[in-house]
Structures are given as structure tokens and as C-alpha cells.
């Protein structure tokens, strides 16, 4: 009996097992990984990717997809940076603008999908191009230096000298997302839309409204990620998106969010974000030749996904 | 309800456009939009000189500045510049060049995707009496004049400076863009070969794209995995801020020397503030300005050498300059300027080009 119970829960623990395995490999490969500096780096680095992953997770649960995350983050960053400058280096303006711009991009995504009935795959791909172009246009190839105290503290300093403020913001966003996903109608209907869209339609729920809300919340997440990134790098420019598009979606999926929709948890996404962040750390710590880095990162992601699939098959067999 | 929603949608789109346009009011109207423009605008007729630029990709920060510089030169020379993007695609670039030939532009500038695949179409252009400039890349053909950047030699010099400052010992790292990109490759190669001359030194090379958040993460991981690093060279000023940030977070600003490349104003300021040891002024804006000026010369029938190098300037403080001269590092015609001069020269196109 106990064994069956354990096997059933296995699929939930798969991401944690992958994370544990990676940490062990890292420690064996390079003892420096256990240093305070490494742990600090990890907490800092997981913050922005993790917040993007929450947005990606929400969209995926609703059985949508959002390719505009990376460049939406860049656009939120540069528009916020422009207004930050204009308002005499006001941090409040930067924070509010970044979140609003992110949410607006999400709103446009949601409206295109619900009103124009375009598939999210194509429409968010197109929005990705729009955001990319706009961010380069607004950024004008320049950099804006951040000088506001609390913004710099968000990116650089630690609470009690241990926990980076960025990580604390990440946890705060995680708690808010958990609340949205588990305790609000938005959450319930998001899972419902992902699980069975027809059922949602026939139960008279205003599906369009909630779909749009999903993309708006995701967009706001990308805006928050932009704030985190610029405060860590201390400059705002249009080249801040990095690999956040792939990493955000991969974090959600490795953490148990299904690409078909209807499944995903905040805790799983958190672990997924740690896994993705550690993959690139692993590449540097193991001294992987630069030309192989991308290829190996891709292979590790595929391996992690296959592991997830294998585990869930085992646990399904047990239930059957 | 539908109308209200359409109104909201339009306002949202408009607000993006307004933010974008309000920043670019001082852009000259001589150029097309910076994004991929498939609309083939007919060349201005009559006696006006028209230049056609078949760029690889017009959507990165580098190209924004390059276009700015190019437009400034175009305004000075009273010529028109058609900026087109080949979207990193060889066939599309060939098609753009063929279009330019049809339109009868006075000079074609290419940011070549491939240095051999474009030879046939360049010779076509030459046969039609249109000079061709290859920007930043050497195309081996009589039909093509090349404008090149001194990246290899300058980065090699920076590498040697770093090595000498470190007295020929220690582990250093070079952060480059991406393998296969010519500019990034040259800047990586220059540094690696300089360090290779010192047997007690080791060089680690890591790609960071042209992205600040990737650079931050890579540098953080590099410093954590390898506490012995004493020098880092970044191939592009646009990301070196992130390098400094990571070094600062690790508390190693006194232990690690940072050098940079490109000579942005922020880069020169960092040299003044002793954050970076030195940088090199090439600058996307100056590249654009210089390339357009060269194109105008060709369009006016002047002869140019097959290979032309953009005059670059090493930026460092005077005390380092003395040391560099003492070590005998450098090359004929090398220019060293102070960071203050670097800041003025970034925008002032009247100085610092070989005439």
C-alpha cells in the first residue's frame, strides 16, 4: 500500500529529484559551488527568470502560450527607463511604468486572442516582434543608469546580509501567484479553460474576460521581471531579455506545467526555475567548451523533460 | 462593448507609437524605418546621390546607433540613404542588392552575411557601374571596397596591456558575443592570441551574446567557479556594466582588472572612475558616419584602397599611456586618447577620422 502511495506521488517529486541531482553534480564538479557567493548568485539569478516563469505558467495552464515574454520585458524596461529619466530619476515612476507596460502588452495579447480569434502561437509571436522593434526604437541604442537608492538595493543588497532583496521580491510574487492560482476565480477558471474549454463555455462563464486577465497578469509578471533585471544590472537598455523566453517556459514545464494546459503549480515552477538557472551555472562550473554550451543546455532540458514524462508514466501505471 | 474594446486596443497601440515617436523627433527623415522594411522605396531621381545599405539586421542597438551616425553623414553630404534589412538571410541580402542595382543607386553598402556567397552579385553591381562597399568584412573581389575595423589588432593590444599590468601571470577571461559573428570573433581572437604569448597566463572564453542579463549571470558564475580570475575583457561596452556589477557584488573590484571595447560614453566615464582600465573607441555611430562618407566618395568617382581601416583610438588615462609607451606595446599609427576626449569624440564626428 505504502509503496503504491509513494509511486503515485512520485511525479510530483520528479522536479525536486532533478534539482537534487544537479546540485550533487555541481558540488562534485567544483567545490566552489558551496561558497556563500554561489548561493547568493543563485538566489539573485533565479528571481527574474522565476517571475517570468510564473507568467508563463499561468498562460500555459490556460492552454495558451506566450512568446512575447522576453521582448515584453525589454519594452517594459526601456519605456520605464525613458520615463524614469524624464521624471528626474523617480524610482516609483519606473516601477509603476514597467508593470503597466507589461500588463498593457498582455492586454493587447489577450484582446487579439479573444476578439480577433487568432491563435496565441501566432499572435504572441507577432507581438514578440512588435515588442522587439518598439524596445529598440524607444531605447535608441543607449543606456540609462539607475541611481535611485532603493532600486539599487533591490538588485544588489541583502536582508540581514544573507538573502538578496531580489529573491525576497520573487518570493512575494510567488505567494501572490499562489493566491491567484489557488484561491481566486481567475485561478479556478484558468485551470478549467486549460482542462476543458467547452465545459467552461457551456457553463456560461465569461471565458474571454478571464483569458484576457491571464495574459494581463502574465504581462505584469514580465514587467516585474524587468524591474528586477534592471536593478541587478543597474542600467536600462533594450538588451536585457537574455534567454528569458525559453528559460521561463522551460522552468514552468520542467516544474510540471503541462503544455496542453490544465496542469501546473507554483511550487513546481519555483523548482523548475532553480533547475533552469542551475543549468547555465553548471555549464560554467564544469568548464563546458563555449561552442557546446547551447547544445548541452538544450540536451539537459530535454533530459529533464523526459525524466518528468517517464516518472508520470510510472505513477499513472500504478493508479491504473 | 465591441466598440469600447476596439477603442482601448487602438489607444494602447497609439500610446506605444507616441512613446516611440516622441523620442525620435530629431531623427532625420532621410532614412527609412529601422525595422525590416519590405517596402522598396524608389531611389530619389535626378542628381541626388542615393546610397543603398543592405544590412544584416536593423533591430539591434548597434544598428540604431549606426543609422544615427550614417544619417548625420548623409545630412552633411546631402545624400539619401536607403536602409534595408536582410534579416540575417543570404538570399534576401542578394535580392536587396539586385534591387539596388535595378533602382540605380550610386553606391551599395553591404554588411555581408557571407564573404564568398556575395561575390557574384557584387560583380554584377560593378558591371552596372555601381561601387560596392563591404562593411566590417573582407570580400575578396576587385569589385568590392572594404571598410574594416581594427578589432583584431586593437584587442590584441588591449590583451597585451592587461598581461603586462598583471606581470605576465594569472588567469583572465574574455567575454565575447557569439561564435561565427565576424566582429565578435576578431575581438575574441585578438585577446586570446595576446594572452597565449604569456606561458604563465590562462584565458577562459565565454559567450554572452550582446545581452546584459546574460553577461551578469555568466560573470557571476565565472567568478564563483573560478576565484583566481584577475582580469576580464569584455568585447562590448554595452555589456561591460554588467561585468563590473558582478565583480562589485563579489567584492573583487580591487582584485580584478576590467577592460572593455567600443568606447561608449559610459565606457569612457568608467575609465575616468577607475572602474575599467581601458577601452577602445570605435563606436557604432562613428562606424555609420564613416561608412556613409566613404560611400559618398566612391559615388563621386573617387578611388579608394581595397582595404580601408576605421581609425580607432585606445582610451586610457595618461599614467597607463606612459606605461604602454614604455612597454613598447602597440602598432604604427596607434592613437591613444584620454577618456575625456573619448566622450567628446563619441558624438563629435569632426574629429578622429583619417582623411
Image (cartoon, coloured by chain):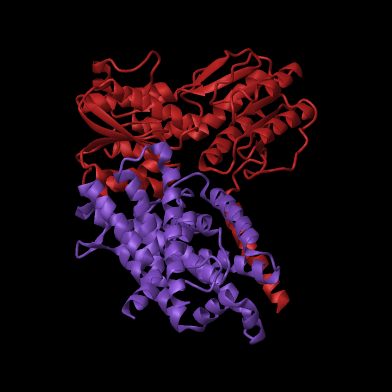
Chain colours: A purple, B red
Report the residue that reaches farthest toward the bottom: A203
Residue shown at 47% from the left, 52% from the top = A241
Residue A98 vertical position relative to residue A286 in the rendered view, above or below? below
Residue B198 vertical position relative to residue B268 in the rendered view, above or below? above
Q: Is residue A124 left or right of residue B206?
A: right
Q: Is residue A133 visible?
A: yes
User: x, y percentage for residue A180?
Assistant: 45, 78
In which image quadrant can residue A152 be found?
A: bottom left
Residue A298 vertical position relative to residue B125 in the rendered view, above or below? below
Residue shown at 63% from the left, 82% from the top = A199
Q: Is residue A149 visible?
A: no
Q: Is residue B236 left or right of residue A28?
A: right
User: x, y percentage for residue B346?
Assistant: 45, 33
User: x, y percentage for residue B178?
Assistant: 46, 37
Residue shown at 57% from the left, 44% from the top = B59
Towards the viewer: B127 or A297: A297
What is the count of numbered marks? 0
In which image quadrant can residue A285 be found?
A: top left
Residue B50 vertical position relative to residue B255 in the rendered view, above or below? above
User: x, y percentage for residue A280?
Assistant: 37, 49
In which image quadrant can residue A64 be found?
A: bottom right
On-image quarter of the N terminus of chain A: bottom left
Towards the viewer: A107 or A8: A8
Residue shown at 38% from the left, 25% from the top = B190
Amino acid at each position: 500500500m505504502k509503496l503504491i502511495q509513494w509511486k503515485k506521488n512520485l511525479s510530483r517529486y520528479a522536479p525536486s529529484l532533478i534539482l537534487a541531482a544537479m546540485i550533487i553534480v555541481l558540488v562534485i564538479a567544483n567545490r566552489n559551488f558551496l561558497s556563500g557567493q554561489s548561493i547568493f548568485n543563485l538566489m539573485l539569478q533565479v528571481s527574474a527568470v522565476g517571475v517570468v516563469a510564473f507568467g508563463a505558467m499561468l498562460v500555459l495552464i490556460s492552454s495558451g502560450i506566450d512568446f512575447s515574454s522576453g521582448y515584453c520585458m525589454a519594452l517594459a524596461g526601456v519605456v520605464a527607463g525613458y520615463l524614469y529619466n524624464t521624471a528626474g530619476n523617480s524610482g516609483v515612476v519606473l516601477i509603476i511604468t514597467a508593470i503597466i507596460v507589461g500588463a498593457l502588452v498582455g492586454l493587447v495579447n489577450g484582446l487579439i486572442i479573444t476578439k480577433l480569434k487568432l491563435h496565441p502561437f501566432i499572435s504572441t509571436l507577432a507581438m514578440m516582434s512588435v515588442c522587439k522593434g518598439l524596445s529598440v526604437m524607444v531605447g535608441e541604442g543607449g543606456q540609462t543608469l539607475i541611481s535611485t537608492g532603493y532600486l539599487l538595493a533591490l538588485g544588489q543588497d541583502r536582508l540581514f546580509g544573507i538573502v538578496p532583496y531580489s529573491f525576497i521580491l520573487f518570493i512575494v510574487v510567488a505567494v501572490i501567484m499562489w493566491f491567484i492560482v489557488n484561491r481566486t476565480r481567475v485561478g479556478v477558471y484558468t485551470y478549467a479553460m486549460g482542462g476543458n474549454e467547452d465545459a467552461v463555455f457551456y457553463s456560461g462563464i465569461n471565458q474571454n474576460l478571464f483569458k484576457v486577465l491571464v495574459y494581463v497578469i502574465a504581462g505584469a509578471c514580465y514587467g516585474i521581471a524587468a524591474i528586477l533585471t534592471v536593478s541587478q544590472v543597474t542600467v536600462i537598455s533594450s538588451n536585457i531579455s537574455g534567454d528569458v523566453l525559453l528559460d521561463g517556459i522551460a522552468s514552468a514545464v520542467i516544474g510540471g506545467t503541462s503544455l496542453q494546459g490544465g496542469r501546473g503549480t507554483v511550487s513546481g515552477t519555483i523548482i523548475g526555475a532553480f533547475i533552469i538557472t542551475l543549468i547555465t551555472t553548471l555549464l560554467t562550473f564544469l568548464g563546458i567548451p563555449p561552442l557546446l554550451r547551447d547544445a548541452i543546455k538544450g540536451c539537459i532540458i530535454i533530459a529533464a523533460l523526459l525524466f518528468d514524462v517517464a516518472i508520470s508514466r510510472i505513477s499513472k501505471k500504478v493508479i491504473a | 462593448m465591441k466598440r469600447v474594446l476596439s477603442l482601448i486596443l487602438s489607444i494602447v497601440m497609439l500610446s506605444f507609437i507616441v512613446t516611440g515617436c516622441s523620442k525620435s523627433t530629431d531623427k532625420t527623415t532621410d532614412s527609412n524605418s529601422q525595422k525590416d522594411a519590405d517596402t522598396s522605396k524608389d531611389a530619389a531621381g535626378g542628381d541626388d546621390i542615393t546610397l543603398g545599405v543592405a544590412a544584416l539586421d536593423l533591430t539591434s542597438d548597434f544598428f540604431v546607433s549606426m543609422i544615427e551616425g550614417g544619417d548625420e553623414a548623409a545630412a552633411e553630404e546631402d545624400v539619401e540613404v536607403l536602409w534595408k534589412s536582410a534579416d540575417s538571410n543570404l538570399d534576401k541580402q542578394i535580392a536587396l542588392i539586385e534591387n539596388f542595382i535595378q533602382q540605380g543607386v550610386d553606391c551599395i553598402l553591404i554588411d555581408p552575411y557571407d564573404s564568398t556567397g556575395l561575390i557574384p552579385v557584387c560583380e554584377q553591381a560593378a558591371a552596372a557601374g555601381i561601387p560596392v562597399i563591404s562593411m566590417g568584412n573582407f570580400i575578396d573581389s576587385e569589385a568590392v571596397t572594404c571598410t574594416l575595423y581594427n578589432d583584431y589588432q586593437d584587442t590584441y593590444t588591449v590583451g597585451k596591456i592587461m598581461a603586462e599590468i598583471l606581470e605576465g601571470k594569472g588567469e583572465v577571461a574574455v567575454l565575447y558575443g557569439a561564435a561565427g559573428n565576424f566582429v565578435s570573433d576578431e575581438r575574441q581572437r585578438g585577446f586570446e592570441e595576446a594572452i597565449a604569448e604569456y606561458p604563465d597566463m590562462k584565458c577562459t572564453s565565454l559567450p554572452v551574446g550582446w545581452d546584459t542579463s546574460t553577461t551578469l549571470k555568466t560573470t557571476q558564475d565565472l567568478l564563483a567557479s573560478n576565484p583566481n580570475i584577475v582580469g576580464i575583457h569584455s568585447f562590448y561596452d554595452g555589456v561591460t556594466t554588467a561585468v563590473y556589477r558582478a565583480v562589485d557584488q563579489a567584492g573583487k573590484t580591487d582584485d580584478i582588472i576590467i577592460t572593455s571595447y567600443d568606447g561608449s560614453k559610459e565606457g569612457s566615464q568608467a575609465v575616468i572612475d577607475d572602474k575599467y582600465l581601458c577601452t577602445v573607441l570605435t563606436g557604432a555611430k562613428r562606424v555609420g558616419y564613416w561608412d556613409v562618407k566613404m560611400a559618398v566618395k566612391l559615388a563621386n568617382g573617387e578611388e579608394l584602397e581595397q582595404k580601408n581601416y576605421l581609425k580607432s583610438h585606445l582610451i586610457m588615462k595618461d599614467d597607463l599611456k606612459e606605461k604602454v609607451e614604455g612597454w613598447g606595446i602597440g602598432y604604427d599609427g596607434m592613437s591613444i586618447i584620454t577618456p575625456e576626449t573619448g566622450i567628446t569624440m563619441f558624438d563629435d564626428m569632426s574629429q578622429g577620422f583619417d582623411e
